[in-house]
Amino acid sequence: MTAPSSKSFAAHIKEADWAKGLRPHFLYRDLGMKNATHGRVMAHVIKADQSCDGPGGYHSHKLEFQMNYLLNGWARIDLEDAGEIRVEAGDAWYQAPGIKHELLEFSDDFEVIEITIPGDFPTFEEKR
């Protein structure tokens, strides 16, 4: 497969555009990878916009790759195939394609980088 043609760039924090997204308690900052790769890869920063008021909803995504790197704070996550894990700033986790998962709890300063392949993918609410 030939890589899409694009120009190198930097995503500067002073030009950051934070927006509401999939989950209402978070703000999302697109890092420009989806546009640069013509939708093949998505990278964004997700940060808490309000205090955690309980589990975020058991769900799955149809995608090929999903990983997260926690920049600030901590979280408790339930992964269908790994059980409950607690992560802190500096930790990373991989979610296997299609795995059911849920963010159970997070700190007020929660901030994570998420990378997915592809850049757009459907999300499915799941039953426990």
Image (cartoon, rainbow, N blue to C red):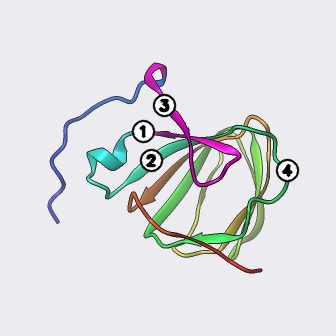
User: What is the C-alpha distance between the residues marked 2 and 1?
Assistant: 6 Å
Give the secondary structure at mark 2.
Answer: strand
> Looking at the rendered structure, which numbered label has been put on residue 43?
2
Label 1 near label 2: C-beta < 8 Å? yes
Residue found 81% across the figure and 47% down from its top: 52
Dot 4 corresponds to which residue? Answer: 53
The kind of residue on which mark 4 rests is Asp
- In the rendered structure, the answer to whether residue 106 lies left or right of residue 48 reads right
Dot 3 corresponds to which residue? Answer: 17
Q: Position of residue 63 (x, y in %)?
A: 45, 69
Q: Position of residue 17 (x, y in %)?
A: 48, 31
Label 4 near label 2: C-beta < 8 Å? no
Which residue reaches farthest top? 14
> What is the crowding at mark 2: few (fewer than 14 residues within 10 Å), some, or many (at least 20)?
many
Residue 27 part of the magenta segment: yes
The kind of residue on which mark 2 rests is Ala
Badge 2 or badge 4: first in the primary sequence:
2
Residue stretch rendered in magenta on the structure: 14-31
Label 2 near label 3: C-beta < 8 Å? no
- Label 2 or label 4, whichever lies nearer to me, is 4
User: What is the C-alpha distance between the residues marked 2 and 4?
Assistant: 26 Å
- Label 3 or label 1, whichever lies nearer to me, is 3
Dot 1 corresponds to which residue? Answer: 31
> What is the crowding at mark 3: few (fewer than 14 residues within 10 Å), some, or many (at least 20)?
few
